[in-house]
Image (cartoon, helix red, strand yellow):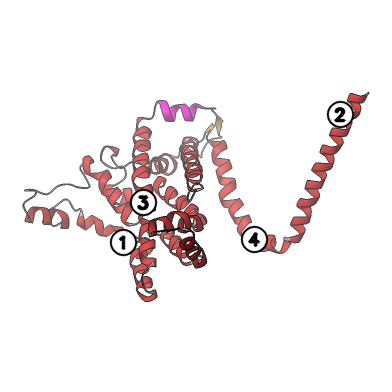
Amino acid sequence: MEAKTIQQTEKGSIYVAKESRLAHLKKELIRGKHYYILMAPYLIIFFLFTVIPVVISFGLSFFSFNMLEIPKFVGWENYSRLFLSDDIFMIALKNTFIFAVLTGPISYIACFLFAWIINELSPKVRAFMTLVFYAPSISGNVFFIWLIIFSGDSYGYLNGFLMKVGVILEPIQWLKDEQYILAVVIIVQLWLSLGTSFLAFIAGLQNIDQTLVEAGTVDGIKNRWQELWFITLPSMRPQLLFGAVLQITMAFAVADISIALAGFPSVNYAAHTVVTHLMDYGTIRFEMGYASAIATVLFALMVGTNMIIQKILRRVGE
């Protein structure tokens, strides 16, 4: 009898706790109803055009679907084919990881360093330099200028310069030789990488509370590097996280630059990435189930990498 009474009491306390949580949630929703109404248009669009397509894509990855016939359930067959039978996907995955490992951290650190240096300049010079560094990322297909620089004939700027100084005797096919293609695309991607993350870092540096710097000087901060680690970076943690998400997404989603410079597909798939592989099966072959499996793997890679980076950034300043 006592055991039953204790169990009933525990169940009652759990029910009351759940009820109190629901009541608190309802109270908070009513209190912030104006904010939710203002956010509703964006949330509806985000849910319709981002959340639902991601869920549908994940579900479709377990089917064989060519957009003409009724989808046929195949289970894990698309994933087993992807990792065990598709050699081109493994090349694309390798190239994508190389892109991510090189362009992601380098562009992220470059964004912060340039923002940190430019922030120390006078307001007019700072505004001009911000425009200079940010301009390539908002100039559309401006990266086509690199086609002239890396042109495979003697009229290409790089070939012309190297032949003039005697480094090479005949033009190098920069965009046709597989040993150079990937490096060229990485260079162009790095050139374009000073985008939104760069502006976010500039904004974060501008909003640092200067009283923290003064207090740090009193507490024993001796140089700019200590100020950077113990004051600047912790104060910019939201901007750092935002920039990390953007740079990781850009690093894993390389496609347009690769196609524009190296063609589609590139020579021996030397610049083939997961996104171009996805485009191949999704927009050319119309194997939508298989393309959905590729998209799901790419999504998992992005989410996993973002979680790791966020854990690392939370330790900044400790």
Q: Does the segment drawn in magenta span residue 22?
A: no
What distance separates the C-alpha of mark 2 from that of mark 3?
A: 62 Å
Please identify, in this view, whether the residue under mark 4 or under mark 3 is nearer the observer.
4
In screen coordinates, is 176 left or right of 13? Answer: left
| Dot placed on the residue nearer the N-terminal end, 1 or 2 | 2
- Nearer the observer, disc 4 or disc 2? 2
Between tags 1 and 4, which lies in front? 4
Report the label total.
Answer: 4
The residue identified by callout 1 is 142
Q: Mark 4 points at which residue?
A: 39
Closer to the camera, 318 or 131? Answer: 318
Of the numbered discs 1 and 4, the one sitting upstream in the chain is: 4
Q: What secondary structure prevails in the magenta region?
A: helix
Q: How far apart are marks 1 and 4 (CA)?
A: 35 Å
Q: Mark 2 points at which residue?
A: 7
Q: Find the magenta span and give its range.
A: 73-84
Give the alpha-carbon distance from disc 3 to disc 1, as whole Å: 12 Å
Residue position for label 3: 256
Circle 2: residue type? Gln
Q: Which mark is residue 181?
A: none
